[in-house]
Image (cartoon, rainbow, N blue to C red):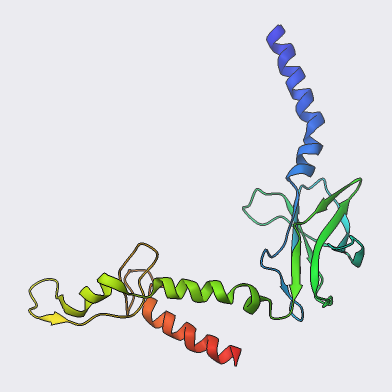
Amino acid sequence: MRLFLRFLLSAACFLVLLPFASAQDAKVLTNQVGYEAAGPKHAVIQASAADNFTSCTLNDSRDQHAALTISPRHVGPVQKWHTGEYWTVDFDSFTTEGTYYLVCTSGDHSLHSYPFQIQRLLLERNTLSDAIYFFKEERSSGPMDKADRHLPFDGKKQGFVDAHGGWWDATGDYGKHLSHLSFSTYFNPQQIPLAVYSFFKSTELLL
């Protein structure tokens, strides 16, 4: 009997706390890099079916004032996902640079997003240096690149080949590939051609 009473008490506590757990698990998902001032700006609310988000405000982080009011659009669950219901929040029309956060309201509770930036040339300012550093670190160099200047062939073929330069496969993986290396039909590693293409394409887009 005592065990049954404990079960009833646990079940009652679960039912009482369920709405609070739902609200706690709900979140506003934004682009962690930020948004280009003149580009598209979308956020997603992930919550439970019991929620009904009717309004969001875009708040300025400096003084917390609401710079824009937005009506979120309910789009329902994602097929075969078990993460609740979703709403989309679009604020493409807002172009003022600064740091902002979203506050979205459902009934008597609200969700706050993490702060994010709206900025001109956002990717160039915030990611270009990191991307260049990655390519620099992946460049074949040092003792291994020196050894690559005089490599014997694998198998019965005689002689040597100069294979220095280029970019390594990945951090900690010193393979260098000019063509695909797997049996899959997509996303095959082609590190050196891809790196060269990326440099030329980036230069074209930045000029």
Position of the N terminus by quadrant: top right
Query: Quick check: 86 above or below 206?
Result: above
Q: Residue furthest front?
A: 142
Q: Which is more toward the observer, 120 or 175?
A: 120
The residue positioned 36% from the left and 62% from the top of the image is 172
- Residue 42 location, x and y as percent? 75, 68
The residue positioned 79% from the left and 23% from the top of the image is 12
- Residue 51 location, x and y as percent? 83, 48
Q: Is residue 41 visible?
A: no
Q: Decide if residue 177 is on the left or right side of residue 130.
A: left
Query: Quick check: 112 above or below 67?
Result: above
- Residue 31 location, x and y as percent? 69, 65
Place residue 119 in its image quadrant.
bottom right
Count of numbered circles in the view: 0
Q: Residue furthest top?
A: 1
Q: Which is more toward the observer, 124 or 198?
A: 124
- Residue 203 location, x and y as percent? 54, 89
Place residue 178 in its image quadrant.
bottom left
Position of the C terminus by quadrant: bottom right
Q: Decide if residue 133 is on the left or right side of residue 22.
A: left
Query: Quick check: 182 above or below 16?
Result: below
Query: Quick check: 197 above or below 131?
Result: below
Q: Is residue 3 visible?
A: yes
